[in-house]
Amino acid sequence: MKKNKKTKQVKTHEIKQSGVELFKIFENFIERKGIYLLLALIALIVFFVFKDFIFFHKLYLFKDIGSDSINIDYPVYYSLADYIVKEGIPKWSFNQGMGQNIFPINFIDPFSLFIILMGKDNVYHTLFFAEAFKIFFAGFFFYLFLKKIITSNYTAIIGGVLYSFTSFIILGGEWVIFSTEAVYIALLLYSFEKLYQDNNWILFPISIFLIASNQPFDLYVIGLFLVIYIIFRLFEANEKEPKKIFILLRKLTCLGILGIAISSFFLINSVQLMLESPRVSGESSYAGMLMSKPILGFEGAEYGQTHYLTSFMRFFSCDMLGTGSNFRGWYNYLEAPLFYCGLISLVLLPHFLSLSDKRKKIIYFIFLLTFIFPVIFPFFRYSFWLFTGNYYRAFSIFVVLAVLLVSLKSIENIDHKSKTNIKISGITLLLLLIFLYYSYTNARIIDKNLRDIVAIFLIIYSVLIYLIQFKTIKNIVKLILLFVIVIESIYFSNITINKRPVISGIETKQKIGYNDYTVDAVKFLKSNDKTFFRINKTYSSGTAIHSSMNDARAQDFYGTPSYHSFNQLNYIKFLQELNIIDGKNESQTRWAPGLSNAPLLHGFASIKYTLAKTNNSVLLNMGYDSITTIGDVKVFKNKYFIPLGFSYGSYITHKDFQKLSNLQKYIVLHKAFVIDENNGINLSALSEFQLKDTVQNYSWDEYGKDIAILKKDTLKIIEHSQNIIKGKITLDKKKMLFFSIPFDKGWSASIDGSTIKPLLINIGFTGLLVDKGEHNIELSYTPLYFRLGAVISLIAIIIYLSLILCKYIKDLKK
């Protein structure tokens, strides 16, 4: 009997010993090969989620609520890839609206450059691979960051996987900028820790440069988050030496300024472009309305319940309230809170309460509350965005980071102590399940099947967290935990990506979408007509649920519509003045239809051709002649076309122009140019148009006569490209030469070699006052601060490289 008992004890000891040995082997592997394991896990998840995209069966272009990928991303990248080959650095583009500065938005982050430099014919496929790179880099940098603040490689691997597959990256990646921001934030946090802990400052200016170049407003938004994180970090580290803190802050300030200076080439021009957009300088700003909200007020009564239900449920999954266009929560699928960062983070989050250090408990609680508070009281979220809009966007990733950091600190504590607080685990699971299954007022909008799956994962995680305290099975539990995290990431990412309509690989080979017969029609027109002209379309070629307004960029022609976050302010002012859009409606300033539905202004805007997919008798009645049919596209020519660069002999003050009816405004634009009454220009040689001369019963004959007068003295264009227009004109008297080019201070002009300043006329366009006689006219475009930004960036780069050289020499001496 004693012998059997002794034998059992020996076997038990051997099992424990083998378990300890296996645990050591596992820990050693994680310690030595942690980064490779992380990248392997990310690659595994990416393959199973995106395999159809990898093998080109699907394209990363979404037809549902993610239509911006089709309506903005593809046209922008296609046109930029084409632009760089033809003209070099993108500056002015006539493919955007009626013309706009496009430097430097949308093409200066490394991932966008990858898409552009791979060529316009590869944009369809490189869009996905750029996003895949972001997933890897986000996890990689976040892992490196965690390694600086967490001692466990295993915890850092979990954090890297969770961060890579947050909804902010997987779902937000459809807006391109979200996933890019996630990469830059991870790099910024890592570079800060390198500076703080190792006094290695090299990466910090680079991270600031990337953020500032990508989106100027991010410099403020992400900078504010960094300040909060630094305060949290210094308190957590119990940093008490004022001198050390002062030196750190001084370094951060100087290096931050250096990074901003390096980005000046892009930053200054981006800021100028944004400041001169309707969303900032126009009448559509939300600031007044949002600032009037009560400070401790809740979300409005109409959407309040849905908002809070959405905010809470999106911690469980971004698809809990529906997928894609079937989303039933607050706002829409993309702009609702993107809080999902792995269900294990919710299970682990309250475990910070089991920390033995009371001071750290308080610090973590305050850190969490800092980002949860604005979710509850939206006024603080509005103020975070400087009252520019009622949205989450980058704020979502800050909430995610707060949750992840505290959760990962919790699992590190559990892992090191090999002890789980069963009470916290039990209460946490119970509360999560109650919140998940509670009968909310809007409970019907919750996906019940997905809710059950979430509940299963929560239970599994809770059990595994409890079992991780047993050393004999700890290594097996940790492996299983990693496996479950991978399965969860695959399952939830698959819903977000693959349960929605996208463009298929087959569609790119068919005559549909941006590859429809519009392309052939445009080629036909360009081969037969070498003059400057714009094209109008009565249909859109995009295949998403929202009509595309950037066909000109995707199909390489000059048009008038524009869907852009920062449309040209003067162009928007013109459209508002003519009542084509409501300038106070922020969305209309972004979805600008141009002059498509204003045929009386087609000649004025140098629209020479219209493409339609029907016989379109309306066009035939509005001065168009049918000239040919290509595939299913019918080509019409405007017989009232006026070349770019026609001249006026009369003017009307803006004050008088505003008194006219809408139709009268259309008519008068063909008789006189509009100029501000306080222009300070000598117009004595020109006649002033009188309101009494306004034609009441305007006929097509009268319209034809006005067109003929305007066509009498036009610029004969010798050379034209995106940034240069050269030509000759002969006038029998002093006139105003008008260009339907939105006014921008970056345009410079010369007459017979003498530089003159272009004038703002016709509400938002460009004019030159030209004397009698024959003249050589030249217009050229360079963004306003292009050269200044380049000089500052060059000087900053030299300083940065010099500092690196000095550091290298100093290290060699040591």
Image: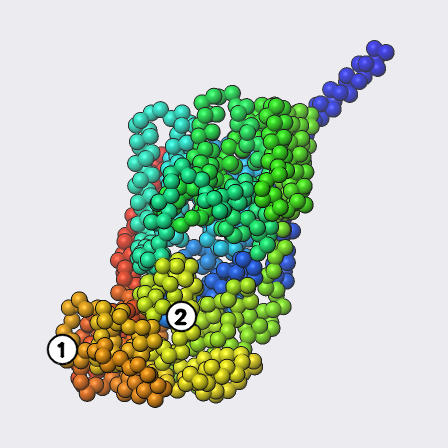
94 displayed left or right of 352: left
Amino acid type of the residue tagged 1 in the rendering: Ser
The residue at 84%/13% (across/down) is: 3
The residue at 56%/81% (across/down) is: 631
Query: Is any part of residue 35 visible from this angle?
Result: no
- Label at residue 594: 2
Q: Is residue 383 above or below residue 275?
A: above
457 displayed left or right of 717: right
Where does the image place residue 518, in percent across and percent down from the top left? 51, 77
Q: Quadrant of the C terminus?
A: top left
- Label at residue 684: 1
Image mark count = 2
Secondary structure at numbered mark 2: loop
Where does the image place residue 367, in percent across and percent down from the top left? 44, 32
Amino acid type of the residue tagged 2 in the rendering: Gly
Q: Earlier in the sequence, mark 2 or mark 1?
A: 2
Q: CA distance from mark 2 to mark 1?
A: 33 Å
Q: Compare residues 677 and 266 and report the one nearer the observer.
A: 677
Secondary structure at numbered mark 1: loop
Q: Is residue 52 above or below residue 17?
A: below
**10 Å neighbourhood of mark 2: few (<14), some, or many (≥20)?**
many
The residue at 22%/79% (across/down) is: 692
